[in-house]
Image (cartoon, rainbow, N blue to C red):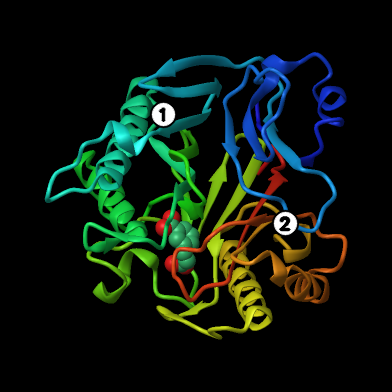
Amino acid sequence: MNPGFLPCLTDADLPSAIAGRADCVLGGVRIGARSNAPAPEWPQQFIPAPLIGTTTDSLQEIWRCATPCSSGKFADIAWRRAGPVLYGVLELAESDFPGSPACSPLQAASQEAYRRIFRLLEAQRLPSLWRVWNYLADINLETHGLERYRQFNIGRQDAFLECNRGATGNVPAACAIGLAGGPLRIAFMAGSEAVVAVENPRQISAYDYPAEYGPRSPTFSRATLVRLAQQEILFISGTASILGHRTRHCGDVAAQARESLTNIAAVVAEANRLARSAPYRIDELAYRVYLRHATDFQAVRDVLNAMLGAAAPVACILGDICRSDLLVEIEATASHDLESTR
Ligand code: 3EB
């Protein structure tokens, strides 16, 4: 029943990993080049952003489970469900949303995307949104008098409020990354179990950011812990070089990477106060690193090697971070078995 995270596979490794049990893949992601192969049967988020520091032009990650999934389509969301866990993928073209003077197309698309997600969860009787992966074009571009990331934040928060979910406290872990173009691309994991929200004592909660970062605060937790019958999952949100609410180390990518990892270590320490499983260690997490400039790769790799060891699984992706002065953002996931007696 429990999903197992199977990270960083090349396309060649995937068939043997699945071994004829494609119905036991909850869903996943493909990052990098588009594939010539037919689309998989499971919901797959596609992130058409270059991989950095690897010779392969794409990678896939999947979440597997022990029993076959049910699946469906709901308001353009492709979803699969294994017992108490659901994974879904949604793409919305902004051109399908005319917007209005008071609401840009991106804001309207963002609100509608989250509205649909919450409706699906209601229909599935799965109350809790655990983790959301958001990608949008030109995230730092100003249109309609406001940076597009800030437009997204308005639409997202409005949907949380409209659907009576509140916009602080028990909100999902997330990332929001800019791509060169394309639709609003959202993947999410959700389920029956409420999350344990984790914050970072070194940072103001994102949902409490002051108005200088936009008219509405971002709606995410620094991390979420999810407890299933035999497994606990730790989702660490996109984490950047922010102390309090301010960007640190403008223009210095190595220092930003160090600050980001120090923030992740602080989030892990907080998570460990709340976790039921054995303590999480930063050298066991599966990382995704987003770089604004591909040329910063070696400087960031050196920091990762020094702080995590060279063996840590890291996927490095070219993408824009949601503040123009941020050069790198790092997110991570881990899963621990829970002893059934606990
Ligand atoms: C930050 O800490 C950096 O808007 O969903 C990180 C993770 C960031 C998630 C989001 C934004 C988001 O504010 C940016």
Where 315 falls versus 57 (above or below)? below
Element carrying mark 1: loop
Q: Name the image quarter holding residue 116.
A: top left
Amino acid type of the residue that numbered disc 1 sits on in the rendered structure: Leu
Amino acid type of the residue that numbered disc 2 sits on in the rendered structure: Leu
**Residue nearest the observer in this picture, 215 or 100:** 100
Q: Which mark is residue 301?
A: none
Q: Which is more foreground, mark 2 or mark 1? A: 2
According to the image, label 1 marks what residue? 126
Residue at horizontal 31 percent and vertical 35 percent from the top: 95
Label 2 close to label 1 by CB (< 8 Å): no
Which is nearer the N-term, disc 2 or disc 1? 1
Residue at horizontal 79 percent and vertical 71 percent from the top: 298
Residue at horizontal 54 percent and vertical 22 percent from the top: 81
Q: How many marks?
A: 2
Q: Quadrant of ligand 1?
A: bottom left
According to the image, label 2 marks what residue? 285
